[in-house]
Image (tube, rainbow, N blue to C red):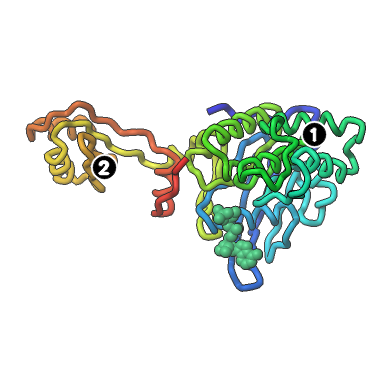
Amino acid sequence: MDAPSAARPGQGDVPASVIATRGLTKRYRGGQLAVDGLDLTVPAGSVFGFLGPNGSGKTTTIRMLMGLIEPTAGTARVLGRPMPRSARTVLPQVGALIEGPALYGFLSGRDNLLRYDAADPTADPRTRRARVAAALDRVGLAAAAGKKAKAYSLGMKQRLGLAAALLQPRRLLVLDEPTNGLDPQGMREIRTLIRELAADGTTVFLSSHLLDEIEQVCTHAAVMAQGRLVTQGAVADLAAGARGRLVVSTPDGAETARVLKELGVGDVSADGDRVTGEPPERDLAEVTAALVTAGVRVRGLTVERASLEDAFVALTGEGFDVAG
Ligand SMILES: Nc1ncnc2c1ncn2[C@@H]1O[C@H](COP(=O)(O)OP(=O)(O)OP(=O)(O)O)[C@@H](O)[C@H]1O
Ligand SMILES: [Mg+2]
């Protein structure tokens, strides 16, 4: 994974954390506690993954950060300024893609962007066409730019929403499930784009329910479950916090499983010639010796590095959708 790129000098007063919330809470009118006492710190220059299953409060948090809804309690600072109070100064420096981008279906993708750009009082009309063409090109929509937006697929609409967020250079991009609806090739393109933007010094905050996606593109992550923050930090540190998995490769699966259980190895499961379990406290050499003594043929024995998914399961006791 690439090291987080530092904020570029000369960008002005970018604070060390571009998003900082304290006790941020949202209870919807119906009584649903969607976000519960969230303390989030997003370092400048990071690609920050905001991870959580459906309904865990990601979009609600993002809508509070963008000043679209008022928190019930707590505070949120974006680019060092309080939201929603400073929305007028903060939002022009932030590109956002939030669930279901609003599009005019009867206009082409290009005309949607021209219109969006025209609504920005700081955007120079003389360079509008070039700006729109560059944004369409960046998200891979150049060929479909003339098509009416209502004829766009979900993935194309998502790309158009992303193009709108990219019309201006931004200090911060906030992307709510940016790869939602994209095919694997489209997902790869967006990941590449995110890395490029980060290399240019933009901090990228993206939500996702796909663990492997976060692991591939993010330097930092926060994990949400049921409105609460489970953990946050550098992705490498989060994964290192989990214990990994003992893996024995052997043609004698059943016998291996029996010996491992006798040795006190927890959560043993055998799948063909691969037997896994919790990493044992004792020396791996002892485990190998015990297997060999029992007449088990051992092809390999190792502790596999923990993934972010292992960390998540260890922290919450829950599984996670990792389908890419
Ligand atoms: N406008 C609303 N009124 C009442 N409850 C809401 C509203 N919007 C969201 N909720 C509830 O708040 C909780 C968090 O929803 P939210 O949309 O923030 O989750 P999410 O993490 O973005 O989920 P997903 O991965 O499905 O997008 C859910 O229980 C949801 O039902
Ligand atoms: Mg959401």
Q: In this picture, is 307 found above or below 195? A: below
Q: Residue at x 81, y 31 (%)?
A: 131
Coordinates of residue 184 in the picture (x, y in percent): 52, 35
Mark closest to the chain's N terminus, 1 or 2: 1
Quarter of the view holding residue 248: top left
Locate residue 195 relative to residue 254 in the image: left or right.
Answer: right
Residue assigned mark 2: 277
Please tell me how crowded label 1 is: few (under 14), some (14-19), or many (20+) other residues with Cα within 10 Å. many
Please tell me how crowded label 2 is: few (under 14), some (14-19), or many (20+) other residues with Cα within 10 Å. many
Numbered tag placed on residue 218 in the rendering: none
Distance Cα–Cα, label 1 vs label 2:
53 Å
Numbered tag placed on residue 132 in the rendering: 1
Q: Residue at x 76, y 41 (%)?
A: 108
Coordinates of residue 107 in the picture (x, y in percent): 78, 45
Locate residue 205 relative to residue 268 in the image: left or right.
Answer: right
Coordinates of residue 53 in the picture (x, y in percent): 50, 53
Q: In this picture, is 224 found above or below 281? A: below
